[in-house]
Amino acid sequence: MRFLDWLKRRHYEREARRRVARAFGDPDILRGTSLGPRHAARWVLLDHEVEGGRVVRAWFGILRHPRPYAFSGQSHKVIEYYRYDIDARRIERVEGRNVTRERGKDAD
């Protein structure tokens, strides 16, 4: 990869990170999702899409440890993948994978 290409990609990655970080502070964008401001420190940028010289979509993931029941001592590691459409101001869950069950366990 040429240095200028790397620099441009880095610029767009930083823009994507800023956009996703700002989304966690906007209740209108989070409305209709299971995400909240408390998840702001837990997401990881996976990819982004550029059109017309700006970031238009960003993909990110969050590792969660949900409990099947509120009173249960069990927890599962679940990776959730999200797509953030910046122009539409909408985050949607693309996929969720229960890592604990994929490893053949019922709970941690």
Image (cartoon, rainbow, N blue to C red):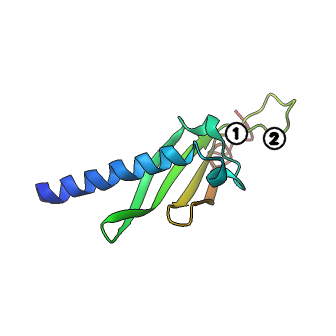
Q: Determine which residue is flagged by label 1.
A: 76
Image quadrant containing the C terminus: top right
Given the image, on which type of amino acid does mark 2 rest?
Answer: Pro
Asked which quadrant contains residue 29, the reply is bottom right
Label 2, label 1: how many angstroms apart (C-alpha)? Answer: 8 Å
- Residue nearest the viewer, comparing 69 with 46: 46
Decide: is 57 above or below 39.
below
- Mark nearer the N terminus (2 vs 1): 2
Indicate the secondary structure of the residue bearing disc 1: loop
Residue shown at the point (77%, 32%) measured from the top left: 74
The answer to whether 56 appears left or right of 108 in the picture is: left
Q: Secondary structure at mark 2?
A: loop
Q: How many marks?
A: 2
Residue 100 in the image, given as x and y percentages of width and height: 65, 42
Quadrant where the image shows the N terminus: bottom left
Looking at the image, residue 76 sits to the left or right of residue 55; the answer is right
Residue at the limit of the structure toward the bottom, as seen here: 52
Closest to the observer: 84 or 53? 53
Examine the rendered structure and indicate whether residue 99 appears above or below residue 74: below
Return the residue at label 2.
Answer: 68
Dot 2 surroundings within 10 Å: few (below 14), some, or many (20 or more)? few
Q: Amino acid at mark 1?
A: His
Instruction: Depth check: give the residue in front, 56 or 69.
Output: 56
Confirm or deny contact between disc 2 and disc 1 (CB under 8 A). yes
Image quadrant where residue 76 sits:
top right
Residue 2, image x, y percentages: 12, 59
Give the number of the disc on residue 46. Answer: none
Residue at image position (13%, 57%) is 4
Q: Is residue 56 above or below residue 40?
A: below
Which residue is depicted at the point 41% across and 47% down? 17
